[in-house]
Image (spheres, grey):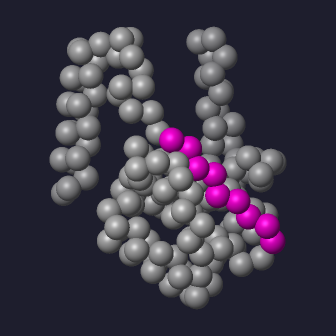
């Protein structure tokens, strides 16, 4: 099973405050543990929402909304993509994570990623082939 592990934004991350050298080192060690265990598939920190945008869909209309966004508690400051045997395993790894921010309360959210078999018969053999072909193309383009 794959899980998206999201670090929720805080006022300091939205203000663009960068982590200390100690926190960067602690996170680096944690990421090394994840990689050595075969858990980490990807992971990145995100710039504040002031450098982002949202796209709102309403019927056929698309509206671009430039950041920053008001509700910090709804924003993501970073993420990992983990391969774990269960939600319980993902939670155990998350509990070992260094505190993501040095001040104030912070949260990590864990959500299971959909797999092809989760979609049932609606995900036809043709759609499965297309998905696999696209995954192969992505893998080739990221191995440059």
Give, as a single range, the part of the protein colored magenta: 104-112
Quadrant location, the C terminus: bottom left
Counting from the top left corner in percent of width and height, residue 117 is at: 36, 25
Which quarter of the picture shows residue 17? bottom right
Q: Measured along the vertical axis of the image, is residue 69 above or below residue 41?
A: above
Q: Nearer the viewer, residue 56 or 119?
A: 119
The structure residue drawn at horizontal position 36% and vertical position 11%, both measured from the top left corner, is 121
Decide if residue 19 is on the left or right side of residue 86. Answer: right
The structure residue drawn at horizontal position 57% and vertical position 87%, both measured from the top left corner, is 21
Q: Nearer the viewer, residue 91 or 72?
A: 91
Residue 78 shows up from this direction: no
Q: Measured along the vertical axis of the image, is residue 24 above or below residue 61?
A: below
Total marks placed: 0
Counting from the top left corner in percent of width and height, residue 2 is at: 42, 46
Q: Is residue 66 magenta?
A: no
Q: Measured along the vertical axis of the image, is residue 78 above or below residue 34?
A: above
The structure residue drawn at horizontal position 26% and vertical position 22%, both measured from the top left corner, is 128
- Check the image and name the residue furthest to the bottom: 22
Counting from the top left corner in percent of width and height, residue 133 is at: 20, 31
Counting from the top left corner in percent of width and height, residue 54 is at: 64, 38
Quadrant location, the N terminus: top left
């Amino acid at each position: 099973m794959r899980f998206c592990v999201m670090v929720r934004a805080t006022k300091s991350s939205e203000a663009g405050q960068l982590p200390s050298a100690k926190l960067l080192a602690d996170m680096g060690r944690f990421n090394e543990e994840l990689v050595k265990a075969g858990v980490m598939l990807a992971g990145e920190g995100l710039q504040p929402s002031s450098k982002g945008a949202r796209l709102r869909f309403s019927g056929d209309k698309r509206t671009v909304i430039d950041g920053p966004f008001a509700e910090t508690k709804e924003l993501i400051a970073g993420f990992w993509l983990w391969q774990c045997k269960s939600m319980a395993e993902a939670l155990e790894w998350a509990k070992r994570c260094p505190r993501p921010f040095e001040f104030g309360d912070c949260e990590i959210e864990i959500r299971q990623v959909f797999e092809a078999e989760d979609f049932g018969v609606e995900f036809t053999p043709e759609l499965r082939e297309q998905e696999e072909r696209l995954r192969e193309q992505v893998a080739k383009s990221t191995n440059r």
